[in-house]
Image (spheres, rainbow, N blue to C red):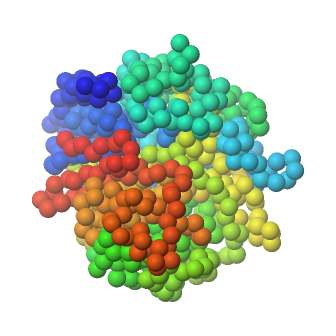
Amino acid sequence: MRPFIAALTAFAFLLSSCATPIWNSAQEAPKGPAMVAAANPLAVEAGLEVLRRGGSAVDAAVAVQAVLGLVEPQSSGLGGGAFMVHYDAETKKVTVYDGRETAPAGADAKMFLGEDGKPLGFVDAILSGRSTGAPGAIAMLAMAQREHGRLEWSQLFGAAERLADEGFVVSPRLAGMIASPFPQSKTPDGARYFTKPDGKRYAAGDTLKNPAYAQSIRLIAAKGADGLLKGPTAEAIVAKTAEGPRPGTLTMKDLAGYRPLKKDALCAPYRIYVVCTAPPASSGVSLLQALRMLEKTDIAQRGPTDPVAWIQIAEAERLMYADRDRYVGDPDFVAVPVQGLLNDGYVTERAKGIGERMATVPPKAGLPPGAAPRAIDATNEPGGTSHLVIVDAWGDVVSMTTTVESIFGSGRMAGGFFLNNQLTDFNFSPTDPDGAPAANAAAPGKRPRSSMSPVIVLDRDGRFVAALGSPGGTSILSYNLKTLVGVLDWKLSMQDAIALPNLIARGFTVTGEADRFAPGVVNALAERGLVLKSSGGENSGLHGIIVREGGKLEGGADPRREGIAKSW
């Protein structure tokens, strides 16, 4: 048995041996099946162990995130942020918990301009202390768990603490990231963490211990979000961002003052369904806009082997991104025309640009009702993100996208975890050449715009149908869109919809996975004006769960990564 798989098997047995359900007569007994879909089997097992003990979907999400931050540090962690969409089966209410990072009080719209007044090179920016915002994932989880938890907060971190202390087996994907050319893995902190005593870098199958992470977990388990945002861990975060080159302005006050946000979900009808996601500063509104445009087409009568269907998806994406890049930002700082972007008349007019051939010139941003003039966005949003979906035995659901932004974030570490470089999601230039303000320019306390758009789908009676989401930087919207079309329109299994080819169309750039399309489709697309280039940036890491007849849960995990979907 391979070392990685053997370790997972042993860990799963250890968890199952102590997984006797602990609910009692004072608790409501579970009613149905439960499932976890996430990017690493160790994290999935940690979530299932919590569910077996009578935990809720949010309880399990806390455990899953704590383990993901350890075993998949290139993607998410204690030093990052997240958006969670939560479904309460009893009330049928969908709520969003916003744990997006915030810019420090010392930030300004010119923070990523160099001495010459021009935008910094992207690598210089992400490796700088300026790139790190106040992390929000743990504070957001703490807020959601207070409202929806069934277990004590302190009981949710055992797996992460044990794996950090005793060590975990480095997976092939993590090993590939350690050996990659990404500069964050070669910073002083990254090199120190990923180098064995013999001077060699950790490889797949090696056991990696992280006692500093275990200590951070113990503080968080005991003190909640204060264990991260106050005290010694916060001091270490601030000290690390204050180091050169290009030190940041993050302070203890910025960290202690971080507040997650609770919002109503942004929902829109799609055929016989209601699709819910996160409102701005998430880009979920753009995903809903694309769905509403596709509803004006005949895509549901087509299928994954029909090239016209992929033309329709590509054109919807180009329209979606054109509007998103112009108008979406933090609504506490800029007016985002959410209702205008989803206005039926506006959507209908935009959908007229979707034909059976790829337009030679990509669409420009439209003028939705209520929109103010905005600059064209030039944000470079790289990948370093993960997604998880959980359904608990009471029917409550979590769909959560979580991130440290780039691969290994800023490459700076504190408390055994990587710090985010989330502030590089702001537009580096505060205005366009004509002086129009950028909706996504940096400002003190502002949350950078995000492509993260976790999804929960309901029927028209408010019953849960499906949940999904993906990492992928700016491509997240495309990955989620094709999967929703796959499960809702083409009636594919969740696994088959996730495995559909990825196609990302934004402006003049159209990339995709040519080798995953059915025979003849790529040539047919080229004949219709859509020439695929190899995908760049972060690939998808889709995870999803859908309810089938009789209440059976069907999960899916992206074959491009190491995740699994497992029920209990």
Task: In the rendered view, tell whether residue 221 sits above or below residue 80.
Answer: above
- Counting from the top left corner in percent of width and height, residue 493 is at 24, 60
Q: Nearer the viewer, residue 497 or 522?
A: 522
Residue at the extreme top of the image, as rendered: 198
Residue at the extreme right of the image, as rendered: 116
In percent of the image, x 51 and y 58: which residue is there?
534
- Counting from the top left corner in percent of width and height, residue 507 is at 59, 70
In percent of the image, x 53 and y 48: which residue is there?
383
- Counting from the top left corner in percent of width and height, residue 454 is at 42, 56
Question: In this orientation, does residue 104 appear?
Answer: no
Q: Quadrant of the N terminus?
A: top left
Q: Nearer the viewer, residue 289 or 301?
A: 301
Q: Is 380 on the left or on the right of 393, as rendered?
A: right
- Counting from the top left corner in percent of width and height, residue 560 is at 38, 48
Task: In the rendered view, tell whether residue 12 sits above or below residue 246.
Answer: above
In percent of the image, x 36 and y 63: which residue is there?
517
Picture quadrant where residue 456 is located:
bottom left
Question: In this orientation, does residue 213 appear?
Answer: yes
Q: Is 497 on the left or on the right of 146, as rendered?
A: left
Task: In the rendered view, tell whether residue 518 sits above or below residue 357.
Answer: above
Picture quadrant where residue 205 is located:
top left
Q: Quadrant of the C terminus?
A: top left
Task: In the rendered view, tell whether residue 409 sits above or below residue 186.
Answer: below
Picture quadrant where residue 67 is located:
top left
Q: In the rendered picture of this protein, how many numbered marks are placed on residues?
A: 0
Residue at the extreme left of the image, as rendered: 550
Q: Is 349 on the left or on the right of 361, as rendered?
A: left
In percent of the image, x 25 and y 64: which residue is there?
492
